[in-house]
Image (spheres, rainbow, N blue to C red):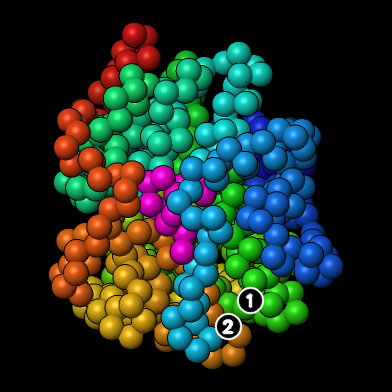
Amino acid sequence: MKYISTRGNAPVLSFEDAMLTGLARDGGLYLPETIPQLSHADIAAMAGLPYEEIAFRVMQPFVGDSFSEAELMDAITAAYSGFGHAARAPLVQLGPNHHLLELFHGPTLAFKDFAMQLIGQLFQKALGRRGEQVTIVGATSGDTGSAAIEAFRGLDAANVFILFPNGRVSDVQRRQMTTPTESNVHAIAMEGTFDTCQAMLKDMFNDFEFRDGVKLAGVNSINWARVLAQVVYYFSSATSLGAPHRKVSFTVPTGNFGDIFAGYIAKRMGLPIDRLVIATNRNDILHRAISTGRYDMDTVFPTITPSMDIQVSSNFERALFYAYDRDGGAVAQLMGEMKQGGFGISQGALGVLRSHFDSGCSAEEATSATMKTMFETTGEVLCPHSAVGVKVALDHLGGSPMITLATAHPAKFPDAVEAAMGVRPVLPRWLVDLFDLPERLTEMPNDLQHMKSLIRERIAL
Ligand SMILES: *Cc1c(COP(=O)(O)O)cnc(C)c1O
C-alpha cells in the first residue's frame, strides 16, 4: 500500500514511512492511494470477535508489507492490554435507538489512547529495526499530549516534546503530562492557544533543515496511523448493533476532525454508515462550514470542552481532498486561502460533504444541561465533550440506530462535571496518586527560534 499527499506534491511513501513522518513535505497530509474494501461477508464475520481481532482485520490491508502479520498482531495485543475494560470499546444504551461508545478505558482516559498506544508499539518496532532515534513533537489541547507521553515514556528510540497551551488544559490533563519522571519526556507550556501550538508544530515541520537535523516525527491526529487505529471501533460497534445487515449512524464530538474522519474511512471501506454527525462546541467552524459552505476562522473561545477549542481543523483537509475528487492542486489552493483567514467550498464539493456529514453545535449551557439530564435519566456520568456529542445526537435521532462517541472519562474534567450535575467523578484506581506527584514542565513564549534551540539542547544531552 502506497501513501500520497492531499496536496499532490510530496514523495509517495510506504505505511511505515508515512507513519514515521507525520506531515507531508508539501504541507499536506498522507492518505492511502486506494481504500481497501471489505465485503458484506467480511464485515458480518466480525460480529462478536474480540476487539484485537477486528483491529487486525481492519488495519492489515492498509499496513501492507510494512509490518508482518505477526508483528502487527503483536503490536495490537500489546497496545490494548493495559485497557481497563475487557471489551476495550464497550457500548451502553442511553435511550431508544441511542447508544454510547465508551472510548475512555485506556491508560490516560481518552479515546486518543486507542491510536497512541498502537503507534507507540509500531514506532518501537520500526525504529528498533532501523537502529534510529527520532524526536517526537506534538501539540495538544490536553488529551493527545498525555496519551503520547504515556505511549512513548521510557522508550530509547524517541524523545517526546509536548506543547500545550499554558493555563488552558485541565489539572488532570496537565498532571498526566508533567508527572512522568522519564528523561525522554518534555512537557512544554506555551503562551497562546492550541492553535498557537499547532502552528508552531507546522512551522517546525516546514523548516526542513531543522526537521531533518533532529529527525522530527509527528504523532498529532494528522498522522495517518492514528486515523487508521480509530477506524476499528466504528466496525466493532456497528457490527455489534447489527451491521452490515442494518445501517447505523454516528455522532462524534469533533475538534481536529480526526476521529470523525476515521468514520468516513470506515464508510468508504464498505461499512454501511447512514449519517456521520459532526458535533462542535461554540467553536463551530466545522458546523458553519457544512451549513454555509464558508470555512472562516474566528477567535478561539475557551470552553468546558478544551479538547475541542480549535479553529484550524487539520484533518478537514483530508475530507476536502475526497470532496474535490482527489485534486491536490485544488486542496493546496484552499489551504493557501485559509492562511488569509478562510475559503469558500465549491458547490460540487459541498454537495459531496453534505451527502456524508450532518453537523450541529452545543452551547455551554446545553452541554451542562445534557450532563445533568443524562445522569438523571440513565445514571451515565458523561464528560463534557461526550455531552456535546449526546446533545447534538439527540437533535439527529430517527431512522438508523445512533452511536455517540464518548471521547473522555468524566474524571478528566471533574470541575465541569461537578458544576453540571453536583457529583464529583473519581479517578480510576491507577491514577489516585496523580495529585501527590511532583510536576516538571518548561514554560515557553510563542517563539520558533526559542523552541528549536530548546529541542536541540535537550536531545544533545
Ligand atoms: C481530541 C479530543 C476530541 C476531538 O477529537 P478530534 O479527533 O480532534 O476531532 C474530542 N474529545 C476529547 C475528549 C478529545 O480528547
Residue 316 in percent (x, y) is at 51, 58
User: 10 Å neighbourhood of mark 2: few (<14), some, or many (≥20)?
Assistant: many
| Magenta residues, start to end | 102-115
Residue drawn 75% across and 79% down? 245
Residue 147 in percent (x, y) is at 41, 42
Tell whether circle 2 marks a residue whose Cβ is less than 8 angstroms from ligand 1.
no
Label 1, on which residue?
A: 241
Amino acid type, label 2: Pro
Label 2, on which residue?
A: 401
Amino acid type, label 1: Leu
In this rendered view, identify the residue nearer to me: 4 or 364.
364
Q: The N terminus lies in which quarter of the figure?
A: top right
Q: Which mark is residue 296?
A: none
In this rendered view, identify the residue nearer to me: 131 or 329.
131
Q: Is residue 25 above or below residue 154?
A: below
Name the element at disc 2: loop
Residue drawn 63% across and 76% down? 241
Name the element at disc 1: loop
In this rendered view, identify the residue nearer to me: 146 or 136.
146
CB contact under 8 Å: marks 1 and 2:
yes
